[in-house]
Amino acid sequence: MKTKRIISIALAGVMAFGLVPAATVLADDKAELTLMIDCPTDPWREDLVKMVQEKFPDYKLTIKTWDEGTVEQTIKTAYAADQAVDVSVYWPTYMKKFEGTGIPMDLTEYLEADQDWKNSFAEGSLEVGTTQEGVLAVPKDTAYPIFQVNKGIFEEAGIEVPEGLSWDEFTEVCEKIKGIGKTPLAVQSDWAGWFVRNAYMQCWDNEEELDAFIAGEVSFKDEKAVAAMDKIADMYNNDYVYPGGKEAVTTSPDDALAAFVNGDVAIYCNVVGNAASVAGKVGDKFEIGVVSWPSLAKTEDMYKLLGSCGGYMIMSNTKYPDEAVEVLKYLTGDEVQQMIADYGGIVTNVNVTSEDANYQLYSKDADKVYPDEVINLSSEIFDNIVYNQPSNYLYNGEAALDELEALREAATAK
Amino acid sequence: MKKRHKAAGVNRKIIFAGFLFMLPAFLVILITILIPLVWNLYLSFCEWNGGGSTVFIGVENYIKSFTTQGTRDAIYHSIFIGIISTLVSVMLGVAFALALFRIQNRLSSVARVIFYSPSMIPMTVLGLLFTFIFASSDKGLLNAILAATGMDFLKHAWLSDKSTVLWVIAVIQGWRSSGTIMMLSYTAMLNIPDSLFESAELEGCGFVKKSRYIILPLIKQTIRLALSMTLVWAFKTYDLVWTMTQGGPANMSMTAPIMMIKTGFSYNQYGYAAAIGMICTVLIGICIIIGRSLLRGENYEY
């Protein structure tokens, strides 16, 4: 019995002793950062992750994949569970959605303390992520939609590739392309809402009307807004969009891209940052042209585009704010931004240069991006327009607008 | 007298030991089910944006749930998927189990693995797989097969048509669960005494009659259990729908779980999301009661 006791005491001692090295490891307070910066659609994703890992060997980094559809949920869920995504890709344009939640960290102090960093951002770009609560996100690149076109198909249809198109011209082009047995346009399901968002900015007579609409003072059933929606619905109903019919609203990204790369489709709806990547996939198969998004605007000054700065935010519950800011500075610094520009991304760092001949072409409409949209009225309206339009309107007609109206009234009542 | 005291002491000790053994399980259930359930119930009567304090608003969230078309549709879609997929899984599962029971040789173990394999595939993988199969373009496998076999008239936008999208999801969900139902039913069939089958054979019964008059009545309890399980699984369908359609297009495949997650985590309306959850819980309960009562019958002991 006595022997057993001695053995058990000895074992307990060994176990306790075994905890010492573990405690030492825990005491070695290496900064542990979770970075949600790996965007699957970015052609530079692998380089970016590698550069960050090599730059910060002393930090314990967990790189997470960023997903456009679930990023907001991920951030909010993490915050509710008191866990931090220390640095996450997010749109500075939409930081209003986080106002009052306490989730984003105010970066004002850090920017003021490092004027070189602050001055590296393009003029006015920091304001996009600034709300009443401070600078809640910093920009990294500009994103807005463009058309990439197959010059061969255009030539075959007897169309000269234009710089831009009015909606009527766009319709004519689509008819001519259909005439030679090709599908005019491919747009992936997640981006179909771009047509609606651009239409909701361009259909007004002047900026006052536009701003009133964005502020929720004008109905979604206003005749100008309805007329714009009808034009988009016609585009689907006339089989201009791959693979044809209403079903085209569910086209997957792979299907849309494959249709363009294989030469089945004449126009590919893309975001500027991915233009170079798509051109690379097309290779020598055909020559690509860049055309501005078709305009519904009655006057040139009302040609506004949706768009945003892609950017980064830091969650306020991070345990390592200084280290997270260091990572943020690197991500928005010259080295990383130059690498992104080399891939064709339109970055916001003023110190970056590019020798790519198309670089200027990709950024030709950057000044048309309007800083606000009606989707910012509420999360519900954002979700409805960004992810459920134009499909809701195509399938449900006026009921879809009733739904939007109810959401607008609820948002403005708040 | 002393003996009785001693016996009572032993009983108390056994009961106490029983409680001790149950304690870990009870704690897990308390923390993971009971407390969240009570919290969810409380939350459903409140307005809460995920931060700050909760504001009691009575039954407003419930009224909103019943009066909002989108929420009503989502709940209806969940019920539809739940019922259809349960029927598919139970019918397929029992049919597979009967087939296995019939062959009962080396082939049956191979067939068992094949029939059970859908249950082993992660739901997201399954969703992606079937997205490729049911894609509306000519690249969709099913449409390509129909075109290749001269049945172009049957080509369809399976996942973009209101009349087909819920059926497709429900059938896939049912097929996926059928493996588990098959295993449960097959195990129950193996427990039926051989003497019953021998008597039936002496009476000249074939396999169909044996199935109808012996097997199915005797495994009814297992089927009832399977029905409850699959109904709950199917009603909670989230990952399959999310991978295949994300609730679209035009919310035509939006289910209650997706609606709840969107309402809570995208719209910051946690109280409203909790109310939808409570309504779904009650509806699942009602469906289970109805399903089980339909299969009610005599319990046979053997």
Image (tube, coloured by chain):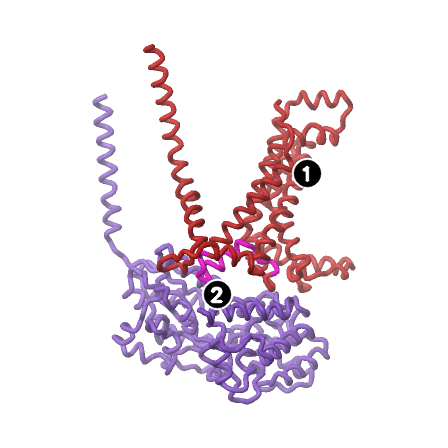
Chain colours: A purple, B red
Provide the residue span drawn in magenta: B252-271
- Name the quadrant of the C terminus of chain A: bottom left
Residue B113's x, y, as percent? 60, 39
Of the 4 image quadrants, the one containing the N terminus of chain A is top left
Give the mark count: 2
Residue at screen point 54% across, 86% down: A205
Image quadrant of residue A32?
A: bottom left
Q: Is residue A412 above or below residue B174?
A: below
Residue B243 can be seen in this image? no
The residue pinned by badge 1 equals B95
Using the image, determine if residue B159 lies above or below residue A339: above
**Can residue B279 be spotted in the picture?**
yes
Which quarter of the figure has residue A163? bottom right
Drawn side of residue A43 relative to residue B165, left or right: left
Where residue A228 sits: x, y (%)?
A: 60, 79
Image mark 1: chain: B
